[in-house]
Image (spheres, rainbow, N blue to C red):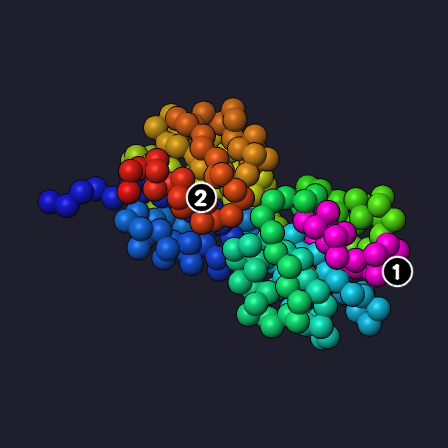
Amino acid sequence: MGKLKPGILITRTAPQAAQSAQTLEKCGFHTFVQPMLHITPTKNAPPPLHNIKYAIATSVHGVAALARCKGADALSIFCFPGASLDAAIAAKFDHIHSMPGNAAMLAHFARCFFEAPLDKGLWVRGRHAAFDVAADMRKEGYDVKSWCAYEAHKETMFDEGILAALHQDNIHCVLFYSARGAQAFCALAQKENVDLRTIAALAISPAVADVLADAGFAAIYQADTPVENSMIDTLKAMFAL
């Protein structure tokens, strides 16, 4: 009889969650997928891009929204490594700049390449952004427009199979990729009387870990850097794989 594979619940949004599951399965984990947020585009039209030189996208969904805009591929785009960078490369943007960190650090990174206020920028955001990139840029004298291109809706129930796996101790660690996703999971776990005392949590960033602090997990781990590869490395160390 083979060694029991650790059960990992991925709460990432689709379709990236399926890609994460494939990667983790290859690493020796048994995966469960339950996105805690569902992304939908807003009805807000993007601003004219003819005088925009660069765009800051603080999520893969922002990159995807921008990629659908005519002429956006000529912009310089600033994004995070991982899924966002992969999406930017796939969209064939002319100039891609990527760095790990948070939204404030990405905004500072963009300021290293352009002058205020002559070079105009665009922040592609979700409706519930935790940090106002445009306001931060304007404070430094930059002319940056804000486009709310998508919104994230919290999941309102667990799939039956996921709930059963949680109650039957088949899930040993839950991966969290955003603060709102963590909030949604914790609310549902409380609603469904899920005992988290035997389950570990792995957060992609300190902000996400803070949301989980009082949820009742057996332990809360945090990736060394806010990218999925770092989460996977941490997961391997946790389970000695």
Q: Which one is in front, 124 or 195?
A: 124
Instruction: Indicate the amino acid at tag 1.
Output: Leu
**Which mark, by number, is residue 219?**
none
Separation of residues labelled 2 and 1 (CA atoms): 39 Å
Which residue occupies the extreme bottom position in the image?
70
What's drawn in magenta, residue-wise?
A: 106-126
Which residue occupies the extreme left position in the image?
1
Is residue 97 found left or right of 208 in the rendered image? right
Determine crowd level at label 1: few under 14, some 14-19, many 20+ residues with C-alpha closer than 10 A: few
Between disc 2 and disc 1, the foreground one is 1
Residue 157 image point, x, y percent: 48, 43
- Per the image, the residue denoted by label 2 is 231
Q: Which one is in front, 93 or 109?
A: 109
Q: Can residue 120 be spotted in the picture? A: yes
Q: Which one is in front, 155 or 48?
A: 48
- Per the image, the residue denoted by label 1 is 118
Instruction: Indicate the amino acid at tag 2.
Output: Met
Quadrant where the N terminus sits is: top left
At a point 48% along the width and 39% down the height, the residue shown is 223
Q: Quadrant of residue 216?
A: top left
Is residue 55 found left or right of 97 in the rendered image? right
Label 1's element?
loop
Residue 221 image point, x, y percent: 45, 33
